Image (cartoon, rainbow, N blue to C red):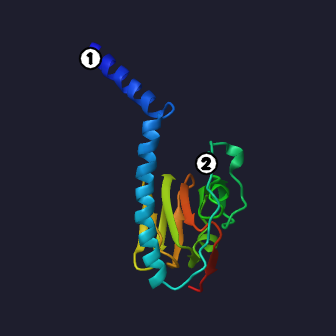
Amino acid sequence: MAKKTASRSAAKTAVKKKWSGLGAGAKKSSAKSSARKTIKSKGRVTAAKKSAPKAASKVRPKQRVAVSHHREEDFKADGLRTYAKYRDLGISAASHGLAQAHVIRLQGPCNPDEVSKLHFHDVEFQMVYVLKGWVKTYMEGEGETLMKEGSAWTQPPRIRHMILDYSDDVELLEVILPAEFKTVELKA
């Protein structure tokens, strides 16, 4: 036990030394290291600029931390699907539209006339994770798949898909890039 205490104490001391006001020598070393990296980086950037056509580069605002704690009153019927309630996790606002994430509760019982409509989303990335219950989906090229609690899947951009059925208690975590996107409903 004495050995563990000694090693914890040594670790705490090392952390304090590293982060409590870097000394002048450490600052010098850091500056040298940083300067070297900048010089190397400039060479690469210059070469890339010469060979690539000029394109307007988007500079995104700095992202911020998003924290979302579970509260029942945060589930709202204001999303894409009329048969679902959504809990926004604050990712869209924190990332300035780079991505969105929400928890979806599909409202049971499943009504295939309302739910099972072939469609696609004009997105760059979409991932779904089943938190609770189950959902049966159809995805172009994959066919029907039953996703249960703990299952996850990605849907490539513009893949045609639909929900076929789901349990009354299903909850899904969905992450999409970008936050704003178009959904196109197709004739079956």
Q: Is 132 rendered above or below residue 61?
A: above
Q: Position of residue 171 (x, y in %)?
A: 55, 53
Look at label 2 and name its amino acid.
Val
Q: Nearer the viewer, residue 121 or 24?
A: 24
- Give the numbered dot on residue 172: none
Give the residue number, with chain letter if any, for mark 2.
65
Q: Quadrant of residue 73?
A: top right
Q: Nearer the viewer, residue 143 or 179?
A: 179
Q: Position of residue 161 (x, y in %)?
A: 51, 75
**Quadrant the C terminus occupies:** bottom right
Give the residue number, with chain letter if any, for mark 1.
3
User: Which label sits in the foreground, 2 or 1?
Assistant: 1
Q: Is residue 161 left or right of residue 84?
A: left
Q: Earlier in the sequence, mark 2 or mark 1?
A: 1
Q: Position of residue 167 (x, y in %)?
A: 53, 57
Look at label 1 and name its amino acid.
Lys
Q: Secondary structure at mark 2?
A: loop
Q: Residue at x 65, y 56 (%)?
A: 86
Q: Evaluate whether residue 133 shows in this view.
A: no
Q: Are marks 2 and 1 in contact (CB under 8 Å)?
A: no
Mark 2 vs mark 1, CA separation in Å? 38 Å
Residue occupying the far top of the picture: 2
Q: Is residue 188 left or right of residue 36?
A: right
